[in-house]
């Protein structure tokens, strides 16, 4: 009997999260989740070994599994099964074929996906994006990641990079972004910038301070919301989505952030309406990346296998 369970691995610079999901009766369900510290000092081969060990342990406890998806915090080559760059995991991936090596270890098909696109897919299938036809996902953390779903399907473009909402230019003379460009949304709204703007050490502290009425934190979140709103307004103008899902620690600020985003949408979107664009907080928390990776692995494996 073919297994209906699928594993997702969300590779982060601090933690490696995993999720087992199930697809039965045309519906996705979450079976189990957990996390372990990432062996960032082990190099590319050591990290792949850890991915294999984690997958084997998860499958032993919650399997059997039919596929594995891996969420990558950076760029990857989907056709070649290679990781190109992981800015927050400073290891040399050159010459390392992650998919081929991991398939040898786990014995089932393996597929890669950017972690922000995995977040978007998870929220589309199991979270705050359920039922949306055209969805924009935005996750705010160390960077600003994004993803797009059109007609209920994650859109990846020709190389898996579609949806990089955080790297659209909103100020051509703005601050330097980690990607090397100037004036990206991420340069104004990544975690360290949010904390500095709000006068706190972390985003979580910024949210708490703003909720308590701290004037600098309130003003800082409003400023961040303005820049996010400009970026989201551009996407709304181009795609006319019916829902925008925002995740990451700063999303906990709720209306302290979202009110300014909505104000920018109303101010800047002129060629389509905004009244029916829902701006909502993500629902799946820290597990969205692993869940989305699992779903992507399953859908990609099914597509590769062809008609049943």
Image (cartoon, rainbow, N blue to C red):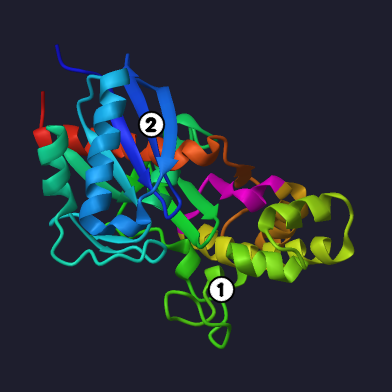
Position of residue 242 measured from the top left corner of the image (x, y, whole percent): 53, 44
Near-viewer residue (98 or 80) = 98
Alpha-carbon neighbours of circle 1 within 10 Å: few (<14), some, or many (≥20)?
many
Q: Which residue is mark 2?
A: 19
* Distance between mark 1 and mark 2 Cα atoms: 31 Å
Is residue 219 visible to the viewer in this orientation of the structure? yes
Image mark count: 2
Chain part drawn in magenta: 239-252
Residue appearing at x 30%, y 49% in the figure: 113
Residue appearing at x 33%, y 40% in the figure: 9
Question: Magenta stretch: residue 164 in it?
Answer: no
Q: Which residue is mark 1?
A: 187
* Residue furthest out toward the front: 41
Determine which of the numbered discs, if any, sits on residue 77 in the image: none
Alpha-carbon neighbours of circle 2 within 10 Å: few (<14), some, or many (≥20)?
many
Q: Earlier in the sequence, mark 1 or mark 2?
A: 2
Residue appearing at x 76%, y 49% in the figure: 255
């Amino acid at each position: 009997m073919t297994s209906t369970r699928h594993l997702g691995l969300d590779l982060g610079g601090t933690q490696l999260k995993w999720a087992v999901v199930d697809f039965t009766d045309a519906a996705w369900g979450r079976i189990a989740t957990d996390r372990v510290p990432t062996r960032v000092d082990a190099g590319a081969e050591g990290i792949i070994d850890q991915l294999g060990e984690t997958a084997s342990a998860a499958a032993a406890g919650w399997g059997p599994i039919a596929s594995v998806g891996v969420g990558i915090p950076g760029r990857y080559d989907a056709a070649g099964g290679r990781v190109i760059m992981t800015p927050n995991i400073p290891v040399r991936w050159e010459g390392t074929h992650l998919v081929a090596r991991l398939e040898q270890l786990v014995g089932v098909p393996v597929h890669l996906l950017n972690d922000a696109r995995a977040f978007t897919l998870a929220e589309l299938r199991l979270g705050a994006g359920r039922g949306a036809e055209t969805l924009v996902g935005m996750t705010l953390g160390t960077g600003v990641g994004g993803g797009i779903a059109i007609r209920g399907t994650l859109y990846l473009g020709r190389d898996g990079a579609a949806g990089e909402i955080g790297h659209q230019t909103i100020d051509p003379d703005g601050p330097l972004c980690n990607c090397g460009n100037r004036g990206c949304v991420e340069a104004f709204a990544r975690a360290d910038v949010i904390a500095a703007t709000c006068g706190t050490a972390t985003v979580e502290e910024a949210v708490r301070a703003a909720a308590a009425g701290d004037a600098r934190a309130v003003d800082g979140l409003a400023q961040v919301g303005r820049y996010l709103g400009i970026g989201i307004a551009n996407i709304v103008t181009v795609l006319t989505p019916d829902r925008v899902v925002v995740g990451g620690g700063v999303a906990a600020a709720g209306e302290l952030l979202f009110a300014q985003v909505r104000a920018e949408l109303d101010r800047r979107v002129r060629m389509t309406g905004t009244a029916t664009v829902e701006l909502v907080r993500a629902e799946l928390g820290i597990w969205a990346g692993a869940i989305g990776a699992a779903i992507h692995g399953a859908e990609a494996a099914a597509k590769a296998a062809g008609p049943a």
